[in-house]
């Protein structure tokens, strides 16, 4: 969040922190989202009505 505050990253930038290194990430495609949702249901044993979510955007509030 400090990098956003400093203007290094924008709020729309898609990055992932892996072992202390920021990596640019591609936008999620509809196919990626659908497959992730199906795998989440499969591995959690949930039904589609349960809306099990296993992959979401992480937003940290109150960090500056």
Image: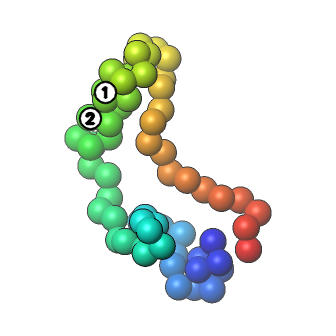
Farthest residue toward the front?
19
Identified at 43% across, 74% down, the residue is: 22
The picture places residue 11, in percent across and down from the top left corner, at: 54, 69
Farthest residue toward the right?
62
Q: Residues within 10 Å of mark 1 (few under 14, many from 20)?
A: some
Residue 46 or 19: which is nearer the viewer?
Answer: 19
The picture places residue 33, in percent across and down from the top left corner, at: 32, 40
User: Which quadrant would the C terminus be assigned to in this image?
Assistant: bottom right
Q: Are marks 1 and 2 in contact (CB under 8 Å)?
A: yes
Q: Quadrant of residue 47?
A: top left
Decide if residue 13 is in sight here. no
Mark 1 lies on residue: 38
Identified at 31% across, 27% down, the residue is: 38
User: Which quadrant would the N terminus be assigned to in this image?
Assistant: bottom right
> In the image, 61: left or right of 10?
right
Mark 2 lies on residue: 35
The picture places residue 52, in percent across and down from the top left corner, at: 48, 26
C-alpha distance separating marks 1 and 2: 5 Å
Which numbered dot is residue 19? none
Badge 1 element: helix
């Amino acid at each position: 969040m400090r990098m956003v505050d400093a203007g290094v990253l924008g709020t729309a930038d898609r990055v992932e922190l892996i072992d202390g290194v920021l990596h640019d990430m591609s936008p999620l495609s509809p196919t990626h989202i659908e497959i992730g949702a199906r795998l989440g249901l499969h591995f959690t044993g949930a039904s589609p009505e349960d809306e099990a979510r296993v992959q979401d955007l992480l937003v940290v509030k109150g960090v500056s």
